[in-house]
Image: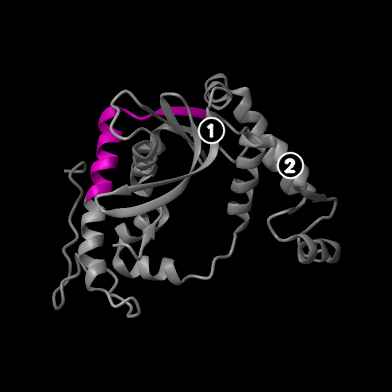
Amino acid sequence: MDDIRLSFSALKAFSKSPAHFAYYKRRAFKQSAVMRRGWLTHLLTLEPEKQLELLVLDVQTRANKQFKEAVAEHGNQSVFTRKEYNEALALAEGIHANPMANKLISEAVAVEKHIEWSLDGVKFHGYADIIGEDYIADLKITDNEPRKIQRWVMDNLYHMQLALYAHSEFNSEAHIRHYLITCDPNAPHGVIVYEMSSEMAEDGFNRARVEVSMFKDWYRAWDGESTPKSYDFAEPLDTPMILDLPTWYK
């Protein structure tokens, strides 16, 4: 597996299907408005000194001629409208106003750290938002209502992401704590810090190992060019898949 290096996002794409992974690897990346807000909020929250490198323009929209000319000269990642900047700043200030979130950030030994590791013979890399002496934390801008967050974390495999980053930094040390700092992008921008239970963190790591095992088996046989079927591991060839009531409903 020396010819491949995965990220969490790549493994997450594979967890959906081999076809999703192939599409992820070939996609032409385009930053959405939500992604821009998330990137800018991370910068203003975790690396506020870097805002000096930004160009913030007092224009109404990104379609403005002045804005387009600035992007052509400085790059899309460096130029923002005043509205974009103010919205991200409000989120960053809300995060720092939360005592627990502020403590995790201010006591961190590293932020936005590029990390590299290997899991079961597969190489990985990524960027860890917050690394403390004995904790790992990730910043998420999302609807963080408590009754929704558990399903959101599991659906997006964020427990797997934190477990992978903790594995990279701390290997198998059992006392490491896993946190999600969440901020609602909508007013009043509520901030909640969630600590994952040891059971959830362990499940995230076990899920990663399962996905890596399946990935290795599939990747060895893939020619690197052909487009896989959508759900190779689950799709029956000539019969429908059965859709049943969920266990929690019965």
Res 154 quadrant in image: top left
Q: Secondary structure under badge 2? A: helix
- Which badge, 2 or 1, is on the more N-terminal residue? 2
Q: Residue at x 72, y 53 (%)?
A: 78
In the rendered image, the vertical position of residue 146 relative to residue 21, given as above or below: above
Q: Main secondary structure of the magenta part?
A: helix
Q: Characterize the local packing of mark 1: few (<14), some (14-19) or many (20 or more) Cα atoms within 10 angstroms.
A: some
Foreground residue among 141 and 171: 171
| Residue beneath disc 2 | 51
Name which residue type carries label 1.
Answer: Ala
The C terminus, quarter of image: top left
Res 185 quadrant in image: top right
| Residue beneath disc 1 | 110
Position of 100 compared to 22: left or right? right
- Magenta residues, as a range? 192-209
| Image location (x, y in percent) of residue 103 | 55, 21
In the rendered image, the vertical position of residue 10 relative to residue 230, given as above or below: above
Q: Secondary structure under badge 1? A: strand
Is 197 magenta? The answer is yes
Position of 120 compared to 67: left or right? left
| Image location (x, y in percent) of residue 163 | 34, 39
Q: Is residue 141 visible?
A: no
| Image location (x, y in percent) of residue 173 | 30, 28
Q: Residue at x 35, y 26 (%)?
A: 176
